[in-house]
Image (cartoon, rainbow, N blue to C red):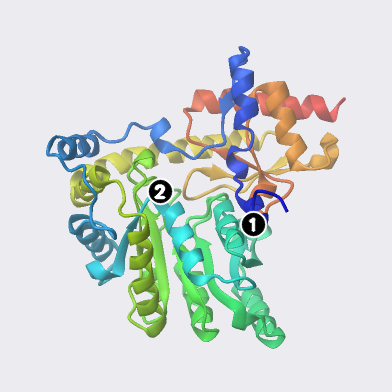
Amino acid sequence: MGFLSKKSVHATNSIRELDGIAEKMREGGRKITKLNIGDPAAYFPTPKYIIDAYVEALREGRTSYSTSHGIKELTSAVSARYKRMYNLDSSNEDIMVTQGVSEALMFLNSALIDNGDMAITFKPYYPEYLSHLKLNGGDMLFENYEESRGWEIDTDRLERSLAKMRSDGKIKKVKYMILANPNNPTGTVLGRKVLGEIADLASEYGIFLISDEIYDEIIYNGFKFTSMCEVAKGIPHMILNGMSKDYDSTGFRIGFMIIPEDDKKSAEFKRKMMDYSATRLSSNTPAEYAAAEALNNVAAHKRAVGKMVREIEDRANHAVERLAENRYIEVVRPNGAFYILPRIDLKALGFGNDRDFIHTVLEKEGIQLTRGSGFGGPSHIRIVALPPKEILDYAINRLNVFCKKRAGR
């Protein structure tokens, strides 16, 4: 018997898997351009009013443990934001503060999943959805975003799949269905009609619904965001969100979950999430006070996020245009978040898989990408469109030239 548990094999992160190689190359004097990490704070300084609130909390000595499920100032601010933006009525008892959405995923899977239990998500998906499920002994049932339809979800197909799960007896083991809107890694923004149909299906089949909305204000190209809470009223569901993306505060590690309904499932789940919050004592106390100020200072936030989103829109659209110049790449334009998931013609370029492709691009060109197979999208790569356009131009130009040379080898 080995020292490590068998389930520890699932503690992986494809987004960072080339970090060690890239760092050694950098130490050896190579220029490395990173297009793999979705960290807005690395390119857009966290707004000063949020930093000031953090410093003030430190100066006032707010450095002890806080309430396990979050200070009231923050849970009230979260409630007010969702009322203001989505007309959601929620109380402090409906909201739990976590150390990023990552901890929320850890909590919910530990609370809901026993060996052999199942969940449903949609390919391409955020890798941590699978990791935390597997770490707790669960299995994922995959549905799909339809690339040919602009990474849309076909709800008729979903309904047929759920009906088959019911006839096969699998539906009894399904504990939840999770989706990201906007999506990481495709940048897709699902519309109200599709979201409503998904919510209705979850209700019909008795599936707890989870919507990860961490990018809900990073919307562009004329698209409008609909929160799941707007279409799932009366249906057991949970919203995941936090300060990392919209509020440009990734390193603060403040996330939150909202469980707004009062049905038996939701009430039981809320109580257990309170228990899990207590197991790690509390989140980052001064960061919680800074987050409360960030949520409450609506005018300052609108100025900051508006400027950031306009720049992200410009950078993402520019990156798509440059990628479209490459005959070996097919790309769907994102309308939210800051990710692009191009399809690579690996056969024409002489690669067996996307893992070999990103390794070679890093080695030959010094460009660090992420393989699409880590998101359930083989033959794709994920590109983060956060860097300034001159950096994106440099990286994509090298990528395009690399593909051209490789195809003519």
Q: Amino acid at mark 1?
A: Lys
For label 2, count other residues whose C-alpha is less than 10 Å away and answer few (under 14), some (14-19) or many (20+): many
* 364 or 322, nearer to the observer: 364
Q: Residue at x 57, y 25 (%)?
A: 33
Residue drawn 28% across and 39% down? 304
279, 353: nearer the viewer: 279
Per the image, label 1 sits on a secondary structure element best described as helix
Q: Position of residue 234 (x, y in %)?
A: 37, 82
Residue 220 place in picture, x, y as percent:
43, 48
Assess whether mark 2 and mark 1 are in contact (beta carbons under 8 angstroms).
no
Q: Is residue 332 above or below residue 58?
A: below
Could you tell me which secondary element the residue under label 2 belongs to?
loop
Left or right of 112, for residue 70: left
Marks 1 and 2, how far apart at CA: 35 Å
Q: Which residue is mark 1?
A: 7
Residue 340 picture location, percent across and down: 58, 44
Residue 375 in the image: above or below residue 112: above
Which quadrant is the C terminus positioned in?
A: top right
Q: Can you name the residue that lies furthest to the left here?
A: 60
Of callouts 1 and 2, the N-terminal one: 1
Q: Nearer the viewer, mark 1 or mark 2?
A: 1
Residue lying at the far right of the rendered structure: 409
Q: Residues within 10 Å of mark 1 (few under 14, many from 20)?
A: few
Tell me, yes or no, if residue 403 can be seen here. yes
Q: Is residue 139 above or below residue 334?
A: below
Determine the residue positioned at 37% across, 39% down: 251
Q: Residue at point 39% right, 35% down? A: 41
Q: Which mark is residue 218?
A: 2
Asked whether residue 223 appears in the rendered view, the answer is no
Viewer-closest of 26 and 346: 26
